[in-house]
Image: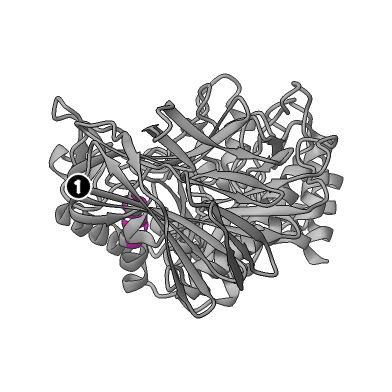
Amino acid sequence: MRITTTDTAYHLDSGHYRLTVSRTDPSAELEGWMTLSLIASVATRSDRDETYETLPPVLAERGDVAVFDFPQHSTAWETKTVRLTCTPETIALEVRVEGDGVISDVTLLGGRAVLNTRAAGTFRSAVHARGVFNPTPTHPVHVVRPVSAPLALTVIGDASPGRLHAVFSPPPLALAFGKGELDGGATSVPEGPWLGASVRAGIADLTFTELRYEPLDGGALLHFDYECQTAVSGAWTSPAVIFRAASSPWEAVSHHREDLVEHGLAPRGPVAERHDWWSGTIFCGWGAQCARAAGRSPVELSRQDLYDEWLARLEEHGVVPATVVIDDRWQLTYGNQEPDPAKWPGLREWIAGRHARGQRVLLWWRAWSPDGLPAGECVTDAAGRAVAADPSNPAYRRRVGEIMRRLLGDLDADGFKIDFTQWFPSGSHLKAYGSTWGFSLLHELLATMYAAAKRVKPDALMITHTPHPAFGDVTDMIRLNDVLELDARGEPVPAVDQLRFRHAVAAHAMPEHLVDTDQWPMPSRADWLAYAREQPSLGVPALYYVESIDNTGERITGDDLRQVAKWWRR
């Protein structure tokens, strides 16, 4: 890298980017892409953290690495320094503080300050791009949105307004800014160039629940929500935001994964041996339950007799899945996972029967549910009521071990489809046994389940919807999850387009993992057929429908099922 110095700035040319770092104010110009605000805030439970003086940057050169430190006087911390670390290909931005406090929020690319010029308030970075790529599915479906539109990468969500953005929980923490025209459909990706912006942090440092891109009036900053659950005593450094040029958003996601692997923050691939049967076709009964419900709750129809009926119809038309997923709700309680004898009077014998036919059986597991658990094993609210299972609690971890011995040992099931990881117990007042939170606590939940399952049955298959590279050690297969409906204009988005987008994210974030292509809900029979045709080329095909499409009531014919069988064979 070449660095030249003037009275007012450092000029850095790496061959991959040009950066001008101001010597008079906390900013840097990333040529063609951003005017970086080098203000940051680390707010605590008791203080908003406002910078009231910025000092000139200090440059340290270490071979082909240049480090710029921007010391700042803070209302909340004894010391605060924003650091830019420049390598030939990347720029890393982070903030370091010293003192004591419980972190509520962190902002990078901007924050609250009174500058030396006496300008005051919240400062943001300027983004010189047209669009921003979002790697997580949302409703409305909007993969590359205008750079002026906010987005969230999170482990919190559901289907209510403003919360349907945790279909992947967690997604890869990688955005991409593009300069192409935004004139395509909801899942289209314009031509480049692109600038990736990803978060470098391992599980231990992923204690926030949400990363938000917050644009306003030509500026933007990144907001990390720590929910007053991360305590600092001494020194603390935030996760780093890594900027790197990319030819496409998919390359930006690949860069994110490579960066984490190279820094020892994510596994290169799965940690368990892959077994041949994992790649076999899947039948999941949830779509059939929904289609048969007719005004009832679909969970009432997770029944042994109905699954036998559906599997018999599939086999009649040549569709013989290698794996069967018994979906919601085969169990009496979500927390303790006991089979419901009224619905599944002979679950052990039923599983043995499927094994005799050469099939495997997975059980659906609702993550976090406190249903049937004592409050002492749960995250609790201000009134002491159970909100979610607490994987930091040794008693709950022992319970998970007992459940695995019962389900994988005594019943001889073959693994789990783990759902609802987005129902994270969010709240600054919530109490857990341990000190982990956010992405880190979710990883602890899945790690507890994963290790306990593998101890009982080493070839147990664990399916999650967590395509963040650091979660590669707690899952065997990434599920693409529920299909959404409309774009930002209220127009339908083809289900198969959503399949391709989601598969591309998972394949670039976790290329060594299998992909469960999923299949629910389908807008129509035509959408379902198009989706089913594409599935075998993108991952493990999963069939959800047997008799009809739940959204439209359209009948599924024998010819339809025979066509599915042909696609599966091919």
Query: Per the image, is 201 magenta?
Result: no
Q: Does residue 443 show up magenta in the picture?
A: yes
> Residue at horizontal 30%, vertical 60%?
448
Can you identify the residue that label 1 sits on?
78
Q: Which residues are magenta?
A: 441-447
- The quarter of the image holding the C terminus is bottom right
Please tell me which residue is depicted at 29% across the width and 47% down the height of the picture. 437
The spot of residue 352 in percent (x, y) is 46, 64
Instruction: Pick whichever, 410 or 269, lies toward us.
Output: 269
Q: Is residue 125 left or right of residue 501?
A: left
Callout 1: SS: loop
Looking at the image, residue 405 sits to the left or right of residue 528; the answer is left
Of residue 425 and residue 238, the one placed in the foreground of this image is 238
Q: Is residue 345 above or below residue 429?
A: below
Q: How many marks?
A: 1
Residue drawn at (61%, 24%), measured in percent from left and top?
217
| Residue 289 locus on image (x, y percent) | 58, 35
Local packing at callout 1 (Cα closer than 10 Å; few below 14, some 14-19, many 20+) is: some
Closer-to-camera residue (495/65): 65
- Which residue is at 67% across, 50% downward? 502
Residue 358 x, y percent position in the rendering? 58, 70
